[in-house]
Image (cartoon, rainbow, N blue to C red):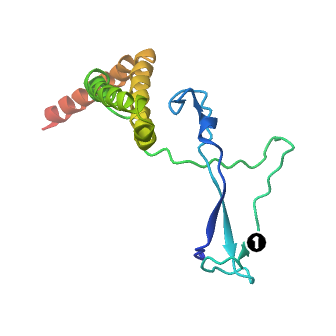
Amino acid sequence: MIVTEKFKDVRLVGAPPSSIGKFADETDNWMWPRQTGDFALFRIYADKNNNPADYSNENLPYKPKYVLPISLNGIKENDFTMVYGFPGRTQEYLPMEAVRTLMNHTDPVRIELRKIRLDQMEQAMEHNDTVRIQYSSKHSSIKNGYTKWQGEILGLKRLNALGVKSQPEFDFYQWAKRILTLNIKKW
């Protein structure tokens, strides 16, 4: 059984400066090793009885019944480790022709369109601080995709993705052809 409580008084208590993850305006979102500081710390506040409450200056930091202990003494074998993230989706199982299309058509078009947008934005941002501030978030978002797809093409080529995918697909084709032939002969 899971019991939930809804706390409405949640406050931002810390966030690193954006420069911690950007070096000369270049985010390393798709470069490894990845050095970013894209996190924030929040604190839940509760009423004087430690119950959920609407925002009030009278609220106090929530005190949970139990917290996961954190050690600063390093790790040892069999220590508990929690990894938390949202990988979203994978393209690992795309067939070879889909990968070829991605490498030779889809990603290059995405890259070129973003390059055009980035060039236009950068020209406007260069001459006007207000525009630079207004466009900075959108610029980062567009540049993120631009960098991702460039790296995707490089990685697929470096890992010989088409060659790696071709053999299992050929083996499957041969197997399916053999099974189909056997079944036709039985009929």
Point out the image quarter for the N terminus.
Answer: bottom right
The residue drawn where x is 61% and y is 27% is 33
x, y percentage for residue 45?
68, 72
Q: Residue furthest right?
A: 73
x, y percentage for residue 128?
41, 34
x, y percentage for residue 171?
32, 23
Is residue 84 left or right of 147 when viewed as pictured?
A: right
Q: Which sits in the foreground, 89 or 170?
A: 89
Report how many numbered discs are placed on residues in the image. Answer: 1
Q: Which sits in the foreground, 140 or 132?
A: 132
Is residue 133 left or right of 18 when viewed as pictured?
A: left
The residue drawn where x is 72% and y is 72% is 62
The residue drawn where x is 59% and y is 43% is 38
Q: Which sits in the foreground, 59 or 79?
A: 59
Does the rendering let one see residue 18?
yes
Q: Residues within 10 Å of mark 1 (few under 14, many from 20)?
A: few
Q: Residue 7: which quarter of the image?
A: bottom right
Image: 171 above or below 37: above
Is residue 173 left or right of 33 when viewed as pictured?
A: left
Which residue does the numbered mark 1 point to in the structure image?
63
The residue drawn where x is 67% and y is 50% is 82
Tag 1: residue type?
Lys
Q: Which sits in the foreground, 134 or 81?
A: 134
Q: Residue furthest bottom?
A: 49
> Is label 1 in a helix, a strand or a loop?
loop
Q: Residue 159: which quarter of the image?
A: top left
Is residue 49 left or right of 164 when viewed as pictured?
A: right
